Amino acid sequence: MDYPAFIAATRDQSRTLAKALPDTMKGFGTLSRAVKEGGVLGVKEKEFVALGIAIAVRCEPCIAFHVEALLKAGATREELGDVLAMAIQMGGGPAVMYAGKALACWDQLQTV
């Protein structure tokens, strides 16, 4: 999978969706900003939680976006490994498959 291209295509789909459902997408954006800005956890920790959930619910576009956000937040590959291990412990075999996708995405985006 070409994750940079996948992320770009998913962003395009989201822009199309925002044109079709402007109020819904604006509300979702407001919620997303509020969650990341408030609370006691930092953005990196919140993105790790989001990544774990994305792996558990098997949302590959979500995995790609949260991996990208983690790189921007200064996460390390070692930290990612801890989160992937926890996701595997909680999610079993299916989580193994999606954790592998998260690691592949990380490795690709780190070289971009």
Image (cartoon, rainbow, N blue to C red):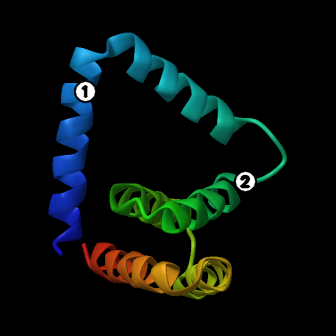
* Quadrant, the N terminus: bottom left
Front residue of this view, candidates 100 and 68: 100
Q: Which amino acid does label 2 sit on?
A: Gly
Could you tell which of marks 2 and 1 lies nearer the N-terminus?
A: 1
Is residue 104 depicted above or below 45 in this figure? below
19 w.r.t. 88: above or below: above
In percent of width and height, residue 55 lies at: 50, 68
Give the number of the disc on residue 17.
Answer: 1
Instruction: Give me the residue at 63% from left, 81% from top.
Output: 79
Q: Residue 40, percent across and down? A: 84, 47
Residue farthest to the front? 93
Q: Quadrant of residue 78?
A: bottom right
Residue 23 in the image, given as x and y percentages of width and height = 40, 11
Q: Mark 2 points at which residue?
A: 42
Disc 2 and disc 1: Cα gap in Å? 29 Å
Q: Which amino acid does label 1 sit on?
A: Leu
Number of numbered tags placed on the structure image: 2
| Secondary structure of the residue carrying numbered label 2 | loop
Name the residue located 60 percent from the left edge and 77 percent from the top edge: 91
34, 25: nearer the viewer:
25
Of discs 2 and 1, which sits in the foreground?
A: 1
